């Protein structure tokens, strides 16, 4: 970033500390910085769970302290169309989608990027923990992990393409979170101590099942163990995800439901969802074979470089909070691919994303369609 000529840069100001420090750093470098607050959800502005109004007040206070303009832009219609409707479709099909990934691909780096370009911006910037590197030998833009491994968000950004990355800056990706908070406190940002937002923007801190209830019809059915015994009732397959342990309502079962060697206190985990028979299959014990996969098939692939990677030195994540697992890739096309792991992967979940890395470089990924126990 050093020595960069002065540019007009539009920063997505969320009201959080990361985007605030992003705007500050760019202003320090002499750029003309404009803040934009994206409103992506408006179904329950008056609800105790929807923090959009508070967030805008925080973002405006940050803009005031930094001495930059802020514009409030409503992308709620785009969001409902491109992100939320897809999210519901996936849940109704029994999969577990990741709306943050869709939101980045469809709103933050598409609708927001387009809006910024209309304002005459040369680049956009967000408070994501990731980095962009222009590889001069290939001419390609690479997406790298953020330097703070515990905060890296490249997983959520893996669908970005060359055109998007060429226009995007991630200043805090070069910093550790502790440093970001230190800068925020030092320059007197009003939100320096604000806690990080977690979860999906339209759900916020609200109970997830209560939220989905509004949109998805419930069809109760049997919960079965691997022997085919019915050991409980589920409230609707959409409300469960693979590997889920809490909220199954079968915790008190005694030995008749326990598997051999499992004992009556071994926890139950969701292992399979059979949409055809509306059956939820559960197993006892975190390491049950039904929860382990050696390979997966992914669809709807998106490659940062525009083409699939060669199969050398690759690793992948099948969920965000997970260490990279060494893997091989086969059958890779622009549409999909297969991954084969050296070690079993736990609770590989259809609908989630499998994201492929070569060291610190995020190569892209796809949506998990199915997982398989053996090779």
Image: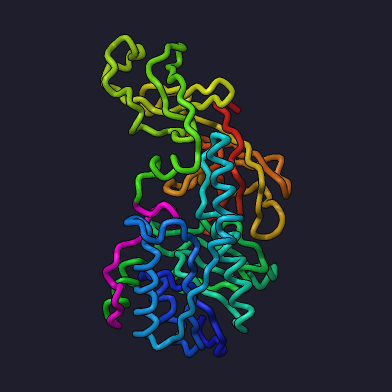
Q: Nearer the viewer, residue 269 or 317?
A: 269
Q: Is residue 164 above or below residue 101?
A: below
Q: Is residue 33 visible?
A: yes
Q: Position of residue 234 (x, y in %)?
A: 42, 25
Q: Main secondary structure of the magenta part?
A: loop
Is residue 190 magenta-colored? yes
Q: Position of residue 272 (x, y in %)?
A: 50, 26
Q: How is the image coloured?
A: rainbow
Q: Is residue 90 above or below residue 131?
A: above
Question: Which segment is the magenta one?
Answer: 187-205
Q: Is residue 289 visible?
A: no
Seen at 55% across and 65% down, the residue is 75
Q: Quadrant of the C terminus?
A: top right
Dividing the picture into quadrants, the one containing residue 107 is bottom right
Is residue 209 magenta-colored? no
Q: Is residue 322 above or below residue 230?
A: below
Q: Nearer the viewer, residue 52 or 351?
A: 52
Q: Position of residue 230 (x, y in %)?
A: 42, 14
Seen at 30% across and 63% down, the residue is 195
Seen at 61% across and 61% down, the residue is 160
Q: Is residue 250 above or below residue 44?
A: above
Q: Position of residue 136 (x, y in %)?
A: 66, 73
């Amino acid at each position: 970033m050093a020595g960069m000529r002065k540019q007009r840069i539009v920063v997505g100001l969320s009201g959080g500390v990361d985007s605030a420090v992003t705007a500050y750093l760019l202003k320090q470098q002499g750029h003309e910085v404009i803040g934009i607050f994206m409103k992506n959800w408006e179904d329950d502005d008056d609800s105790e769970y929807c923090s959009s109004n508070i967030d805008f007040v925080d973002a405006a206070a940050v803009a005031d302290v930094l001495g930059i303009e802020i514009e409030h832009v409503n992308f709620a219609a785009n969001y409902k169309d491109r992100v939320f409707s897809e999210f519901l479709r996936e849940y109704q099909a029994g999969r577990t989608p990741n709306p943050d990934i869709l939101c980045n691909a469809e709103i933050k780096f598409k609708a927001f990027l387009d809006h910024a370009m209309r304002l005459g911006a040369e680049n956009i910037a967000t408070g994501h923990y990731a980095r962009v590197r222009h590889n001069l030998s290939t001419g390609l833009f690479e997406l790298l992990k953020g330097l703070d491994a515990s905060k890296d968000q490249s997983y959520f950004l893996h669908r970005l393409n060359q055109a998007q990355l060429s226009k995007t800056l991630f200043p805090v990706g070069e910093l550790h979170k502790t440093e970001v908070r230190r800068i925020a406190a030092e320059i007197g940002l009003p939100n320096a101590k604000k806690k990080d937002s977690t979860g999906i923007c339209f759900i916020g801190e609200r109970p997830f099942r209560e939220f989905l209830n509004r949109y998805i019809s419930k069809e109760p059915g049997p919960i079965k163990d691997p022997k085919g015994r019915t050991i409980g009732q589920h409230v609707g397959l959409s409300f469960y995800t693979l590997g889920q342990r809490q909220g199954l309502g079968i915790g008190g079962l005694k030995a008749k439901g326990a598997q051999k060697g499992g004992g009556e206190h071994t926890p139950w985990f969701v292992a399979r969802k059979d949409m055809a028979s509306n059956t939820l299959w559960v197993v006892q014990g975190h390491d049950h074979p039904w929860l382990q996969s050696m390979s997966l098939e992914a669809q709807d692939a998106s490659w940062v470089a525009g083409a699939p990677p060669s199969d050398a030195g690759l690793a992948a994540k099948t969920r965000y909070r997970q260490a990279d697992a060494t893997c091989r890739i086969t059958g890779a096309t622009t549409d999909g691919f297969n991954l084969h792991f050296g070690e079993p992967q736990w609770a590989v979940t259809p609908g989630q994303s499998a994201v492929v890395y070569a060291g610190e470089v995020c190569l892209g990924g796809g949506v998990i369609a199915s997982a398989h126990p053996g090779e």
